Amino acid sequence: MPRQIIPFAAADMSALAKSLRAQLAARATPPSHVEMLNMLARGAGHRNFQQLRAGAAPAAAGSPRPPADSTALLRAARCFDAQGRLQRWPSRTAIQHLCLWPLWARIPRGKSFSERGISTLLAGLNLFGDHAILRRTMCERGLMTRTRDGRDYRRVEQVPPPEGAALIRHLRSV
């Protein structure tokens, strides 16, 4: 899954530099990655990086989205047959996660499934015979939820990332 692009702007570059210098001078050791993100956010007038990220508006309908990664898209598309079934489980984790989106799109919205029901559906969407890894990974990635006892599986409604949406469109057009 691609990183969320968060725009960063400081109204006053001099104030940003002074804030960073003061924050760095107060430290005995170099900051970690997260601490540096927080310093930058504070220097631009935010409470912390979480507040900066929360204020970054998601792509609205009609606004341009970042382009899909064509290399990842082609690698993922090669894993599917002409009927949109997943032929093999990719070795690269990023491609695995990308390949889940077309499967997610074929799970009916708002429908509850038993473990057997979702396994049957996923078994029809793959040719390599391991629907359990698909079910498990979709739950881990937040594409599906399941109850603690595993009796109820549901698709989680969300907007796919640009690569996921492009792969779904590509497989529908084949």
Image (spheres, helix red, strand yellow):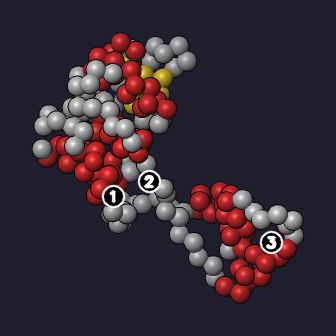
Nearer to the camera, 166 or 129: 129
What residue is pinned by disc 1? 69
Coordinates of residue 100 in the picture (x, y in percent): 35, 37
First of labels 3, 1 by sequence position: 3
Residue 26, quarter of the rendered image: bottom right
Are the residues flagged by discs 1 and 2 in contact, CB closer than 8 Å? Answer: yes
Seen at 32% across and 33% down, the residue is 89
Residue 48 visible? The answer is no
How far apart are the alpha carbons under marks 2 and 3? 30 Å
First of labels 1, 2 by sequence position: 2
Seen at 44% across and 26% down, the residue is 136
At label 2, the amino acid type is Pro
Coordinates of residue 30 in the picture (x, y in percent): 77, 65
What residue is pinned by disc 3? 24
Compared with 103, 136 (above or below) is: above
Seen at 53% across and 64% down, the residue is 6
Q: Which mark is residue 2?
A: 2
Relative to 86, 117 lies left or right: right
Disc 1 is placed on an element classified as loop
